[in-house]
Image (cartoon, rainbow, N blue to C red):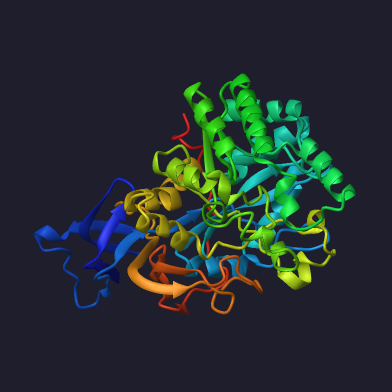
Amino acid sequence: MRTFIVNGTVVNADGRADADIVVEGERIVSVVPRVGGGAQPGPDDAVIDASGCFVVPGGVDAHVHMQLDMGTMTSSDTFETGTIAAAHGGTTTIIDFAEQRLGGNVLAAFEQRMAEAESQCVVDWALHQVLGGVNEQALIDTRSLIEREGVASIKLFMAYPGRVYSNDGQILRALQMCADTGMMAMVHAENGLAIDVLIEQAIAAGNTSPEFHSRTRPPELEAEAVHRASVLARVAGNAPLYIVHLSSSHALREVTEARARGTNIFAETCPQYLHLSLEDHLGQGWPNGAAFVCSTPLRSKHEHHQADLWEGLRIDELAVVSTDHCPFCLREQKLANGELFNKVPNGIGGVEHRMDLVYQGVLAGHISLERWVEVCATAPARLFGLPTKGSLNIGNDADIVVYDPHKTHVLSAATHHMNLDHSAYEGVEVIGGVRTVLSRGEVIVDGEQFLGRKGRGRYLRREVSQHVR
């Protein structure tokens, strides 16, 4: 049986068309312009009427943290609940992380993470490899993951000493490996050593409220780290470099200037930096302000960061919008260690809302419809080696979202599907919403009904990207 998606407007990153899509098995087999009469389903074919809707590629969220073990607690979404939420929000592919911490083994960390995810995910998934202890054996093992497991990217941290922090020499060695292999190096760019000094000083002065999470991680220290990472990438042989969760105008300028110097650099931002602020959210004090503690932190609404980030997305200075989805329940987890900003686990839940929140930028005139598709689906698929994802082309996986631009709904913990007792976007009314979601040709969301099943998601062996040079 084939599935026909008819009467919608098909939107890819390179344009839109009034066309019908034909799916057979797991793949798109035809995209038929309606100017010539459109596709003609037979009596045994399934038909999805997308009248009045956009038909877009399933979203690719390249930065999530499902059931992340923080030592004393674990992020509240499992791979099952988190991917169900992703599906409801129109995301059909996630990339999570296997995390080697200081003193740990890369291959053991990868195998453990595979075991956690493979029987749970309801959408397709892949893994980046975190290097928290860069040494000769770790680099050898990481190289082996390319052929062995189809892992095409690593992540390095310039923050969090004692757990996953890497110094400049370690980062240089890892970037040299990436320059040699073509692996993408994702970097958490904050000057962690300087931040720790500011945290110590703030606490000593009695400044412990949530807003000091942001005030002790100033944008200058994000920008400095981006600059340093870009220099090291060039010295390493112009390694592919990807700055994660970029939150400030200062850091964006460093990305733009590095690119002008010929650096092979890309960057993502996240919905929280486009919609939330230090004053209105972290500034709520206890207990609600704890819900908005994430790193990099929310920035001041008085410094034009949000406007600059939207402009960066518009002109391709920022390549991707991911979520850095890392949810913690407010009462049981965010506040478990008392009212000290540096004891609150970092993270905001948003995997379900990314497509909707970025679409608000289309309505506001910040970005085009095509650019919405590009930053949410096409660009992350290209940058992270997923050639059959992120676009509605013949031969690609039939990951398809029927998106209703006229739907209005209010984001709330009462209605979201994330395993989370609060919403960072509580009460926000959005225009536009998912109506139907197909993952590899199978309808897994229809209206508010989830039709998928635990474990149906497929692990994706990724290629070294051909789009990073």
Does 164 appear above or below 177?
A: below
Would you say 436 lies left or right of 134 here? left
Q: Residue furthest right?
A: 204
Does 264 appear above or below 275?
A: above
Residue 102 location in percent, x, y?
A: 82, 42
Q: Residue furthest front?
A: 302
Residue 78 location in percent, x, y?
A: 66, 67
Residue 143 location in percent, x, y?
A: 65, 35
Among the 4 quarters of the image, the one containing residue 272: bottom right
Question: Residue visible at 61% across and 60% down?
Answer: 280
Would you say 446 lies left or right of 168 here? left
- Check the picture and name the quadrant holding the N terminus: bottom left
Residue 436 location in percent, x, y?
A: 38, 71
Front position in the image: 284 or 32: 284
Residue 389 shows in this picture:
no
Residue 186 shows in this picture:
yes
